[in-house]
Image: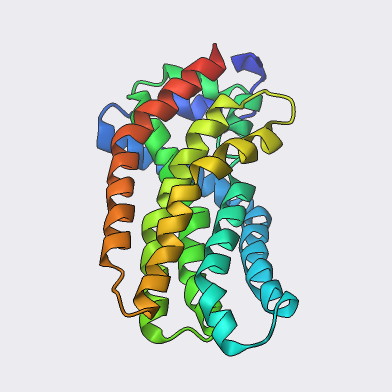
């Protein structure tokens, strides 16, 4: 572990001296900090968005150009592309802080660790998940989805991508320092993300079948609530385990 005196300026010292004590203040401070760091890595964020668009665009070239077939598989393709794009940004959630010793300062910060972790996950979703949600209508139009189905696709991604971020946060913390951590992270997250993928893609299919997407979206909403209730504590525990 790098000593505090060897840490780059502007990372560990800002955490040590940060005047944050309340839960809301800790979440807001950690979110602002990680968003600033993400703004300095715009190329990495652009890669995530470009990957999502490329995956969604290549599928029509690999299957039949039949419009009915494309509409039938559109939701699954969009969700798989969003899941894989999310995986690209997960390794950097804690890796940089762990590598330069900032993670140790986060553990010692005068604020609840679950709140700081929640701020980091929120920033990760705002930097990677929210742009995917905003690009979803473009993917829906590409596959010829009707407006109602596109609206459901956007809603399902808005509810489901934060769950993916929380699943990734816990596994990213557990795999810190592990050899081949990025590959291990993907292997751990993908099975856990299957229910989210099923309900997310199923919501669009149910809407197109005339059955309504309310049940699927309600399940995603319940999963989102559970993720925000238990995710901060699970991720904080994983961070402590990784540090020890």
Residue 94 % position (x, y): 56, 33
Is residue 38 shown above or below 138? above
Residue beneath the point at 36% across and 57% down = 159
Residue beneath the point at 44% across and 49% down = 195
Residue 148 % position (x, y): 35, 82
Residue 52 % position (x, y): 62, 64
Is residue 96 shown above or below 122? above
Is residue 218 shown above or below 238? below
How many labels were placed on the picture?
Answer: 0
Q: Of 175 and 30, which appears nearest the observer?
A: 175
Residue beneath the point at 46% across and 66% down = 133
The answer to which quarter of the image holds residue 64 is bottom right
Q: Residue furthest top?
A: 244
Is residue 35 shown above or below 17? below
Residue 230 % position (x, y): 32, 33
Question: Residue 204: in sight, yes or no?
Answer: yes
The answer to which quarter of the image holds residue 92 is top right
Residue beneath the point at 51% across and 48% down = 36
Question: Residue 142: in sight, yes or no?
Answer: no
């Amino acid at each position: 572990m790098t000593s505090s005196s060897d840490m780059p300026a502007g990372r560990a010292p800002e955490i040590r001296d940060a005047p944050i004590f309340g839960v809301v203040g800790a979440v807001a401070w950690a979110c602002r900090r990680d968003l600033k760091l993400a703004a300095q890595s715009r190329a990495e964020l652009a890669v995530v968005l470009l990957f999502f668009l490329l995956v969604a665009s290549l599928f029509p070239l690999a299957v039949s150009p039949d419009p009915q077939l494309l509409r039938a598989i559109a939701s699954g393709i969009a969700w798989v592309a969003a899941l894989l794009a999310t995986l690209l940004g997960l390794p950097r959630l804690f890796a940089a802080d762990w590598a330069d010793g900032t993670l140790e300062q986060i553990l010692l910060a005068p604020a609840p660790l679950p709140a700081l972790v929640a701020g980091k996950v929120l920033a990760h979703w705002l930097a990677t998940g929210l742009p995917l949600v905003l690009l979803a209508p473009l993917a829906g139009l590409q596959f010829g989805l009707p407006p109602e189905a596109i609206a459901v696709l956007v809603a399902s991604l808005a509810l489901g991508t934060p769950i993916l971020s929380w699943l990734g946060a816990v596994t990213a913390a557990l795999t810190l320092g592990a050899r081949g951590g990025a590959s291990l992270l993907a292997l751990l997250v993908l099975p856990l993300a299957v229910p989210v993928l099923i309900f997310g893609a199923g919501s669009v299919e149910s809407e197109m079948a005339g059955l309504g997407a309310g049940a699927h979206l309600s399940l995603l909403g319940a999963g989102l609530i559970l993720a925000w209730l238990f995710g901060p504590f699970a991720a904080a525990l994983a961070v402590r385990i990784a540090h020890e």
